Image (spheres, rainbow, N blue to C red):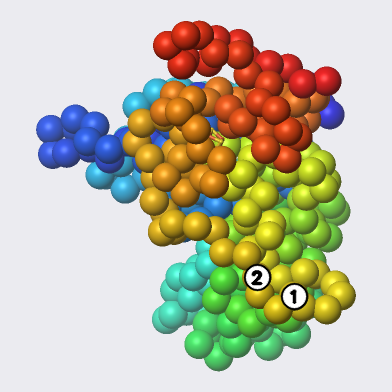
Amino acid sequence: MSASPVLDIRNVSIAAIDSKGVATKMIVRGLDLTLHAGEMLALVGESGSGKSVSASAVLGLLPKELKITEGSISFNGVPVSSMAEKERRALRGKRIGYIFQNYQGSFTPFMTVGKQMVEVIRAHERLSMKQAKETALAWLHKVKLPADRAFRSYPFQLSGGQLQRASLAAALMLKPSLIIADEPTTALDVLTGEQVLDLLSELRKEAGCAVLLISHDLAHVFKRTDRMAVMYGGSVIESGSTEKISRDPQHPYTQLLLQARPPLSGPLTERLEVIPGEPGLVCLQGCPFSLRCPYASEHCSHTPAMANLNDDHAVACHERPAKGEPHVEYASSGEPVKQVVYS
Ligand code: SF4
């Protein structure tokens, strides 16, 4: 892994603020993420877990009711907070591309897809109309669209899958270092969604860019990403190599998420497990998952710290039920006093 990450998020907290700028509710707590060139990292969790808000913070697109209260976000070693708004705007689109689930919003409805792509290319690069058109056509072809027809089409003349491919082309054509893909397949049928993600995976290898994939779909995440971070109630509760977490999830929430999805192969079980409690129910003191966790104990009223299980797997849980006895030591007050490194 190269030394300098493309994206480095350190201890970022985001809060909802009132009209006086005073924090009223924490939305994201102490987020730590690093993403290197060529790597694909997934942020996983239920809606409301803080995934999309975190992505908006990277893009500098937080709504005015939300504010970063702590921590730093650096892009290629430069803190985003030190950049002027003009620099941040140049960053979005040129060096950070994004694909949203609402592909309809990626293009203005009143202009052809091709004209919009040419305008974006020329806004960022010194190319003639002819060169910009050739670049746009080449990218539409790369995402396996009938390039000439897609170029001449208005957005409403393309299907959802075609439009999402066109937005993938538009995101990649400026050769960004980072792509943020926020639930890019939610509005597509299963097959089209698979094709769009396969293309994203293929083109990211070709372009060598990093991808932050925001998803609630574990099947997509397991199939395509190198690393993953699972969020619950605004905190990362498990992170590490996708291969390790899919094989040996350690946090009760991740374990339940895995049990609650249909098997990828073999016969369907008669009944899928259901995660107890209401989705999005967050405990505000201590472990955010404690109100739904089948293993909650008195220790869980204290927030568990992330503990490294090994080089690329960490979990925030006082009890690790899959492995038997808890490995955390507690003071008589019930406070965890030792962060255990598992071998
Ligand atoms: S810290 Fe406690 S409540 Fe939270 S996941 Fe672990 S066992 Fe469950």
Secondary structure under badge 2?
loop
Q: Mark 1 near ligand 1 (CB under 8 Å)? A: no
CB-based contact (under 8 Å), mark 2 and mark 1: yes
Ligand 1 quadrant in view? top right
- Write the residue at 39% across / 51% down: 281
- What residue would you read off at disc 2? 272
- Write the residue at 41% across / 59% down: 278
Query: Looking at the rendering, in which quadrant would you find the N terminus?
Result: top right
Quarter occupied by residue 167? bottom right
Check disc 1: other Cα within 10 Å, few if <14, some if 14-19, many if 20+: few
Determine the CA span between mark 2 and mark 1: 7 Å
Quarter occupied by residue 241? top right
- Write the residue at 73% across / 40% down: 322
Query: Of residues 197 and 267, which is closer to you in this image?
Result: 267
Where's residue 168, x and y in %?
Answer: 66, 65
Residue 141 higher or lower than 276, as above or below: below
Check disc 2: other Cα within 10 Å, few if <14, some if 14-19, many if 20+: few
Q: Which numbered marker is on residue 269? A: 1
Residue 79 higher or lower than 126, as above or below: above
